[in-house]
Every structure is written in structure tokens, then in C-alpha cells.
Image: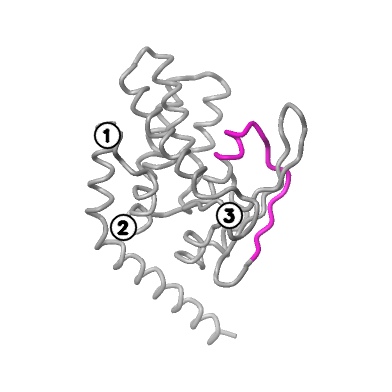
């Protein structure tokens, strides 16, 4: 039993080490694209931006969600200052967090900080368009590709729906989430399939021990 655990831990360490080493060779690619994004360059390809981020040393789709929780609470309280405070912390951990970009855009707008609001809205829309353009979610072959499972929930919310149930499954060499949703107004139910292969394969050990994450 101990031997098996040691082998599993070794595999985890090697997987993460290989990822970090490979990611470091692509840091400049993400940095260049991200700098262009901060200049609101309309020529930025947000899909390339998202994928290059997964190959950078800073990519971690399993970071602590505590500040995201506080950010959402501030949003429901219409507390613009704390939306920005906690949103900024989230964006330091993940500059491509879709919810953080939306909430900080709203908060900056409430405080009359137009430029900051426009920048975050620009990034939010670019990220969301990229996710939506990746697939229609009707089958594994046309699944919506995400680099972080939080993107699944951001998309469902943007459609005006809520998540009823979530199931993970494998097909061929890919990993998927089947999300059961319900429209908040019409109560119409719909199933969307997301391709979660990127975050699952990069940190399989973390994924298996963090299956009860909070969105």
C-alpha cells in the first residue's frame, strides 16, 4: 500500500515538474499577448491568449477560491470597493478569471473609473467570446473547451441559467463535464458538454483531491 502511494506521489511530482518546465518556455508568448490585451488591442486572439496561459508558469486552475467567494458576496451587496479589492486579488492569481473581469468592470463603472471599467469589460467580452466560439456543447466532439472549470460556470451564468447537476466522464483520450442547466426565467432545461482535458491532464493529482471545489 505504501509502495503504491509512493509511486502515485512520484507520478504527480513528475507530471507537475514536466508541466512547469514546458510552461516556462512559453511565458514570453503569454506575456506578449497579455500586454497587448492590457492596451485593448482589438487584434488580440483571445483563444491564443487563453491557451498560452495554460503553458505559462503562473497557470493554476485550482487556486484557493476564498477571494472569489468574497468578491461575489461584495457583488450581491453592491459593494464596489470590495468588489475591486477582492477582484484584484483574484486577478493576481489568474489574470484571465472571467468573473473577476466582469465584477471589476461593473465596480469601476459604479465608481466613475471609466477607463478601468472599459478595460475589464474588453477582457471579459474577449474571454467569453473565446469560450463560446470553442464549441456548441452538444457532444464530446463539439464540446466547449475550457482551461479552467470556473469558465463553465461563467458561461452558464452568461446564458441566464443555473447549474442543476454536473457529471464528469471520459471519452477516447479526453475528459469532459456534462452540465445540466436550467434557465432562470423560462425554467427550460438544457445540457452542455465541456471539454476539461487541459486542466484535468495538467494537474491530475490536484483535480482528484479537489473534486468538491466551490464555484
In the depicted structure, whether residue 168 falls above or below residue 103: below
In terms of depth relative to the viewer, which is nearer, 9 or 120?
120
- Residue position for label 2: 57
Question: Mark 2 Cα within 10 Å, few/some/many (few <14, many 20+)?
Answer: some
Count of labels shown?
Answer: 3
Q: CA distance from mark 1 to mark 2?
A: 24 Å
Question: Mark 3 Cα within 10 Å, few/some/many (few <14, many 20+)?
Answer: many
Q: Position of residue 89 (x, y in %)?
A: 39, 37
Residue placed at 60% from the left, 85% from the top? 1
Upstream in sequence: badge 1 or badge 2: 1
Q: Is residue 160 magenta?
A: yes
Mark 1: secondary structure: loop
Read off the magenta span: 154-169
- Residue position for label 3: 143
In terms of depth relative to the viewer, which is nearer, 130 or 111?
130
Disc 1 + disc 3, Cβ < 8 Å: no
Q: Position of residue 131 (x, y in %)?
A: 49, 45
Q: CA distance from mark 2 to mark 3?
A: 26 Å
- Residue position for label 1: 41
In terms of depth relative to the viewer, which is nearer, 67 or 125?
125
In terms of depth relative to the viewer, which is nearer, 122 or 110?
122
Task: Give the residue furthest to the top.
Answer: 112
Residue placed at 51% from the left, 41% from the top? 66
In the depicted structure, whether residue 12 falls above or below residue 191: below
Q: CA distance from mark 1 to mark 3?
A: 28 Å
Amino acid at each position: 500500500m505504501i509502495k503504491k502511494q509512493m509511486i502515485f506521489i512520484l507520478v504527480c511530482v513528475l507530471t507537475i515538474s514536466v508541466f512547469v518546465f514546458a510552461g516556462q518556455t512559453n511565458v514570453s508568448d503569454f506575456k506578449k499577448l497579455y500586454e497587448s490585451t492590457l492596451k485593448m488591442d482589438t487584434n488580440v486572439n483571445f483563444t491564443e491568449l487563453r491557451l498560452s496561459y495554460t503553458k505559462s508558469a503562473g497557470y493554476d486552475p485550482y487556486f484557493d477560491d476564498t477571494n472569489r467567494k468574497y468578491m461575489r458576496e461584495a457583488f450581491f451587496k453592491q459593494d464596489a470597493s470590495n468588489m475591486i479589492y477582492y477582484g484584484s486579488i483574484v486577478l493576481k492569481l489568474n489574470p484571465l478569471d472571467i468573473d473577476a473581469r466582469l465584477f471589476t468592470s461593473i465596480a469601476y463603472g459604479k465608481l466613475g473609473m471609466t477607463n478601468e471599467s472599459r478595460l475589464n469589460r474588453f477582457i471579459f467580452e474577449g474571454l467569453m467570446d473565446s469560450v463560446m466560439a470553442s464549441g456548441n456543447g452538444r457532444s464530446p466532439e463539439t464540446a466547449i473547451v475550457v482551461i479552467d472549470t470556473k469558465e463553465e460556470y461563467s458561461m452558464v451564468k452568461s446564458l441566464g441559467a443555473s447549474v442543476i447537476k454536473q457529471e464528469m466522464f471520459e471519452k477516447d483520450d479526453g475528459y469532459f463535464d456534462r452540465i445540466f442547466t436550467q434557465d432562470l426565467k423560462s425554467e427550460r432545461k438544457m445540457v452542455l458538454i465541456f471539454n476539461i482535458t487541459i486542466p484535468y491532464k495538467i494537474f491530475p493529482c490536484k483535480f482528484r483531491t479537489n473534486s468538491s471545489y466551490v464555484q
